[in-house]
Structures are given as structure tokens and as C-alpha cells.
Amino acid sequence: MEYPKDAVREALLNAIANKDYSGGVPNQISVYTDKIIIWNEGQLPENWTVKNL
């Protein structure tokens, strides 16, 4: 599967910019045939929920 270059760049930049650098846990990128998962240990700001996003 091919992904838009700009979308992948934005996802990577968000993972780097919003990472919690105090814990030392690296960002993780998993590439599958049907998806890409980009994960970091960062958390939403206090009082924010995924629904509010």
C-alpha cells in the first residue's frame, strides 16, 4: 500500500514533537502490508480526551 508522503511526514513530525522526552522511551514505528503504526509514550494534556480531539 502506498501512503501520501505529506501525511507520513506529518505523522512522524507529530510523534517527534509530542514525545515525552523525560522517560527515555523511543518512538516506535511498525510497518505492515495494510497500515503504518507510529507510537510514542506521550500523553494528552490534562483534561483532554480522544473524543475531544
Image (cartoon, rainbow, N blue to C red):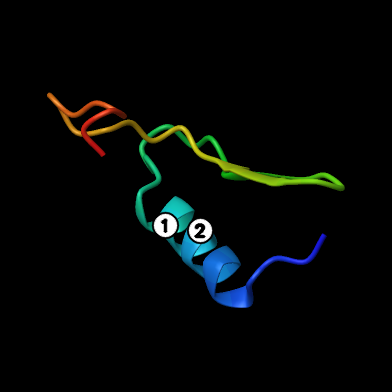
Give the residue type that dot 1 points to: Asn
- In the image, what residue occupies the spot 27% across and 33% down? 44
Q: Is residue 23 above or below residue 32?
A: above
Cα distance, mark 2 to mark 1?
5 Å
Residue at (40%, 45%) from the top-left corner?
19
42 and 37: which is toward the camera: 37
Asked whether 17 or 50 is in front, the reply is 50
As helix, strand or loop, the secondary structure at mark 2 comes to helix
Q: Position of residue 41 (x, y in %)?
A: 46, 32
Q: Which residue is mark 2?
A: 11
Q: Element at badge 1? A: helix
Q: Which residue is mark 1?
A: 14
**Identity of the residue furthest to the left in this view:** 47
In the drawing, does residue 14 fall left or right of residue 26? left
Q: In this rendering, is residue 6 above or below 11?
A: below
Labels 2 and 1 touching (C-beta < 8 A)? yes
Q: Going by the image, does 53 lie left or right of 8?
A: left
Q: Is residue 53 above or below residue 15?
A: above
Residue 9, x across and y down, in percent: 55, 70
Q: Is residue 34 left or right of residue 50?
A: right
Residue 32: x %, y % from top left: 83, 44
